[in-house]
Amino acid sequence: MTCKEAEQMVMPYINDELTDKELEAFLDHVYSCKSCYEELEIYYTLYAGLAQLDGENEGQDMHNLLQEALYASDQRVRGRKLFNIYYVFSQVLAMAALTAMIVTEILKL
Ligand SMILES: [Zn+2]
C-alpha cells in the first residue's frame, strides 16, 4: 500500500468502515510507516477530542486512545485470521477422515 492509499483510509478507519482485508493492509502500512502513523495519530486524537466534547470517552487518556484502538483492530484482524485457519484446517481434517473411511471400505471389498 502506498502512503496516498493509507491516507485515504484514515477517516474510514476512524469511522470503522474498513473491511478486514483493508484493515489488515492499513495496519501493516501504519506500523511500518512513521509519517502515516503520525498522520493517523493526529486525526484520531482530533476525532477523539471532538467526541470528548460531545461527552463521549470522558476521562480517557488521549494518548492511549489510538494505541488502544490499534490494538483492538489488530486483535480483530488476527482473530479473524486464526478463525479462518481453524476453519480450513477442520475442513481438511474432515476430508481426510472421509477419504480414509472410503479407502478402508474399498480395501474391505
Ligand atoms: Zn505511509
Image (tube, rainbow, N blue to C red):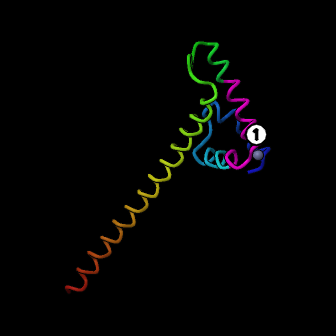
Q: Is residue 81 above or below residue 40?
A: below
Q: Nearer the viewer, residue 21 or 28?
A: 28
Horizontal and vertical percent position of residue 11:
70, 32
Does the magenta-highlighted stretch encompass residue 33? yes
Residue depicted at x 44% and y 52% = 83
Relative to 74, 100 lies left or right: left
Horizontal and vertical percent position of residue 59:
56, 17
Horizontal and vertical percent position of residue 68:
56, 34
Mark 1, other Cα within 10 Å: few <14 / some 14–19 / many ≥20: some
Instruction: Tell me where the magenta segment starts and ends, as one range.
Output: 29-47
* Residue denoted by label 1: 7
Q: Secondary structure at mark 1?
A: helix
Residue depicted at x 73% and y 43% = 6
Residue depicted at x 55% and y 44% = 74
Residue depicted at x 59% and y 38% = 70
Q: Is residue 4 above or below residue 83?
A: above
Point out the image quarter for the C terminus. bottom left
Relative to 5, 12 lies left or right: left
Where residue 23 sits, quadrant-wise, is top right
Task: Point out the residue furthest to the left here.
Answer: 108
Mark 1 residue type: Glu
Instruction: State the predominant SS element of the stretch in magenta.
Output: helix
Q: Is residue 81 above or below residue 69?
A: below
On whether ligand 1 comes within 8 Å of the CB at mark 1, the answer is: yes
Does the magenta-highlighted stretch encompass residue 54? no
Horizontal and vertical percent position of residue 29:
70, 48
Relative to 29, 92 lies left or right: left
Relative to 69, 32 lies left or right: right
Where residue 106 sits, quadrant-wise, is bottom left
**What count of labels does the image hold?**
1
